[in-house]
Each structure stands twice: as structure tokens, then as C-alpha cells.
């Protein structure tokens, strides 16, 4: 849930225009992002994908996140 003084359209627009890059000199944020990815990465799925033959018709999925 997000609480804001703005209306929903303006809030959505402001969120859409946010920069989503991570400065390389912000070590604390870089480590937080890396820790979050490591904690949520489904390594078994990744291993399967890396060993499976490449198929151009395969649609990418978000199975790399643990459920």
C-alpha cells in the first residue's frame, strides 16, 4: 500500500518517471540488491535453464524467483 497526498494518476506518473538505475558508488545499496537477489534466486530452475537446449519459441518466464 502506498499513501500519498497526490491523486492516483499523478502518483503513478511520478513512480513511472523514477530512475531505476543503481549508482555503482553506492556500495550499501549495491550490496542490498545483491543480497536480495541471492536470497530469492531459484538456483535449481537456473541450472535447468542453463543445461536445457536453446529453443527460440520458448517464452521467458519469471520462474527464477522462489515461491
Image (cartoon, rainbow, N blue to C red):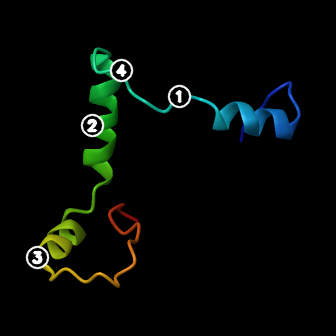
Q: Are marks 1 and 3 in contact (CB under 8 Å)?
A: no
State the separation of the CA atoms marked 3 and 4.
33 Å
| x 40%, y 78%: residue | 59
| Badge 3 density bin: few <14, some 14–19, many ≥20, Cα 10 Å | few
Mark number displayed over residue 23: 4
Q: Which quarter of the rendered picture does the C terminus lie within?
A: bottom left
Label whose residue precedes the other's in the sequence (1 or 3): 1
* Circle 1 residue: 19
Of the image marks 2 and 4, the number of the one nearer the N terminus: 4
Give me the residue at 34% from left, 35% from top. 33
Q: Which residue is mark 3?
A: 51
Q: In which image quadrant can residue 53 be found?
A: bottom left
| Residue that protrudes farthest toward the top in the picture | 25
Marks 3/2: CA distance? Answer: 24 Å
Mark 3 or mark 4, which has the lower sequence index?
4
Q: Secondary structure at mark 1?
A: loop
Vertical arrangement, residue 48 with respect to residue 37, above or below: below
Looking at the rendering, in which quadrant would you find the N terminus? top right
Q: CA distance from mark 1 to mark 2?
A: 18 Å
Q: Are marks 1 and 2 in contact (CB under 8 Å)?
A: no
Quick one: label 3 or label 2, which is nearer the N terminus? Answer: 2
Pointer 1: residues within 10 angstroms few (<14), some, or many (20+)? Answer: few
SS at mark 3?
A: helix
Q: Which residue is mark 2?
A: 34
The spot of residue 25 in percent (x, y) is 28, 14
Q: At 25% across and 46% down in the image, what residue appears?
A: 38
* Marker disc for residue 54: none
Amino acid at each position: 500500500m502506498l499513501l500519498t497526498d497526490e491523486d492516483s494518476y499523478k502518483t503513478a506518473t511520478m513512480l513511472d518517471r523514477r530512475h531505476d538505475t543503481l549508482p555503482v558508488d553506492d556500495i550499501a545499496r549495491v550490496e542490498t540488491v545483491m543480497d536480495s537477489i541471492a536470497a530469492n534466486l531459484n538456483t535449481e530452475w537456473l541450472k535447468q535453464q542453463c543445461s536445457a537446449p536453446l529453443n527460440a519459441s520458448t517464452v521467458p518466464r519469471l520462474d527464477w524467483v522462489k515461491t
